[in-house]
């Protein structure tokens, strides 16, 4: 009987400690309650419920596989189109023919009619500079045709 009395006191002490711990951890000192117009979305300890769209990625950033990245080659067709867009603003370039062989990109520029021969070399260097900066994964070789 004496052992059972010690066990009862120990259980009562644990229950009291647990109840005090729960009471101390349930509030932050304000009387906000759960009925504050948010339907229980925010609780009183500052933790905000997080919800994600149903896209299967649970909020990871840049999870779209079609976002072009620095080290991500989608395919040669898309890379060729992006290269044409990149050199479109180079003065003297009308179009381009782009061929790939692994990491080698061979670009043949179509120049404006009437462009001087000495200006053609400058246009080639400018286009090569733009392409090498924007597409570091390729070894770019630029030539021109009239």
Image (tube, rainbow, N blue to C red):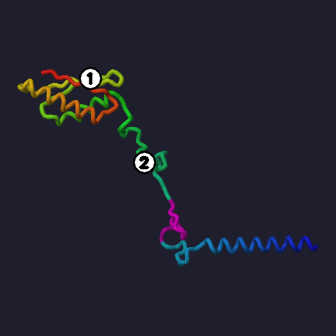
The magenta region covers: 37-49
For mark 2, give the secondary structure.
loop
Q: Percent x, y for residue 59?
A: 46, 50
Quadrant of image for the N terminus: bottom right
The percent coordinates of residue 41 (x first, y second) are 51, 65
Residue 143, labelled with which disc? none
Q: Residue at x 85, y 70 (%)?
A: 7
Q: Residue at 46% across / 46% down in the picture?
A: 55
Dot 2 or dot 1: first in sequence order is 2
Q: Quadrant of the C terminus?
A: top left
Q: Relative to 74, say whether 64 is above or below.
A: below
Q: Residue 27 or 128: which is nearer the viewer?
A: 128
Residue 61 circle label: 2
Which type of secondary structure does the marked residue at label 1 adopt?
Answer: strand
Q: Badge 1, how many Cα within 10 Å: few under 14, some, many 20+?
A: some
Q: Quick check: 53 above or below 140?
A: below
Name the residue at 41% across, 45% down. 62
Q: Is residue 76 magenta?
A: no
Mark 2, Cα crowd under 10 Å, few <14 / some 14-19 / many 20+, is few
Q: Which residue is mark 1?
A: 106
Residue placed most toward the observer, 91 or 56? 91
Position of 11 compared to 82: left or right?
right
Q: Is residue 44 magenta?
A: yes
In this view, the residue in front, 36 or 82, is: 82
Report the residue that reaches farthest toward the right: 1
Question: Dominant secondary structure of the magenta stretch?
Answer: loop
Could you tell me residue 18's position as x and y percent? 71, 71
Q: CA distance from mark 2 to mark 1?
A: 34 Å
Q: 27 left or right of 140?
A: right
- Left or right, residue 32 beside residue 124: right
For this rendering, which residue is in front, 52 or 25? 25
């Amino acid at each position: 009987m004496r052992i059972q009395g010690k066990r009862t006191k120990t259980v009562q002490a644990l229950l009291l400690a647990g109840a005090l711990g729960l009471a101390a951890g349930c509030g932050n000192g304000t009387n906000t309650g759960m009925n504050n117009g948010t339907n229980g979305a925010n609780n009183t300890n500052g933790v905000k419920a997080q919800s994600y769209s149903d896209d299967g990625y649970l909020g990871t950033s840049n999870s779209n596989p079609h976002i072009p990245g620095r080290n991500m080659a989608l395919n040669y067709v898309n890379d060729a189109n992006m290269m044409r867009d990149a050199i479109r603003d180079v003065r003297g370039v009308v179009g381009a023919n782009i061929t790939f062989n692994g990491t080698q990109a061979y670009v043949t520029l179509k120049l404006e009619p009437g462009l001087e021969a000495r200006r053609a070399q400058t246009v080639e260097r400018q286009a090569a500079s733009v392409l090498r900066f924007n597409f570091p994964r390729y070894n770019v070789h630029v030539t021109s045709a009239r």
